[in-house]
Amino acid sequence: MAIVYFGDRFVDEADIPGGITRDALLPIFGEQLDVSVSTVPLSPADLLRADEVFLCGTGMEIQPIREIERRTIGDGTGHGPCLRRAADWYRRIVAGEANTPTGWLVPVNPTFPASSVP
């Protein structure tokens, strides 16, 4: 799932079905990072014009794209300032170190005895 940052807003690819990580990130961008989010179809040219491009998924979390078709994205490091903020916030939420929207994380009872699992 590609999400693109254009200086003042995130653009999410409208033609790709949503996922758990995507659904978690979009509110982070809008509410926590105070960056507008829009969902529209993206062309290859849009990706090449972006300041930051990254993929997200449950296993990979947030991964920057440094280059597309041998063209450097942003400064070429892949970790632009907005991506760094988003990845840090996401990591803190997943680790339980930051406030999350109600129902986003569900505590697991640590006293549940492993021996009771069949």
Image (tube, rainbow, N blue to C red):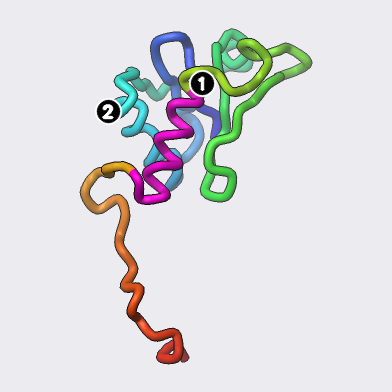
* Badge 1 amino acid: Val
Q: Please name the residue shown 42% across and 20% down the image.
A: 10
SS category of the residue bearing label 1 = strand
Q: Return the disc, 1 or 2, that comes first in the chain's sequence.
A: 1
Q: Which of the 4 image quarters holds residue 39?
A: top left
Q: Is residue 87 magenta?
A: yes
Q: Residue furthest right?
A: 70
At horizontal 59% and vertical 16% (from top left) the residue drawn is: 47
Q: Quadrant of residue 66?
A: top right
The residue pinned by badge 1 equals 4
Q: Residue at x 43, y 47 (%)?
A: 20
Residue position marked by numbered label 2 in the rendering? 31
Indicate left or right for 104 with 80 as reference: left
Residue 82, visible in the rendered structure: yes
In whole angstroms, how far apart are the C-alphas of marks 1 and 2? 17 Å
Q: Is residue 18 visible?
A: no
Going by the picture, which residue comes out furthest to the left? 102
User: Residue 41 at x, y = what percent?
Assistant: 48, 21
Which of label 1 and label 2 is nearer to you?
2
Whether residue 20 sits left or right of residue 50 in the image: it is: left
Q: Is residue 5 magenta?
A: no
Q: Which residues are magenta?
A: 83-97
The percent position of residue 13, horizontal first and vertical second, equals: 49, 27
Q: Residues within 10 Å of mark 1 (few under 14, many from 20)?
A: many
Image point (45%, 43%), residue name: 21
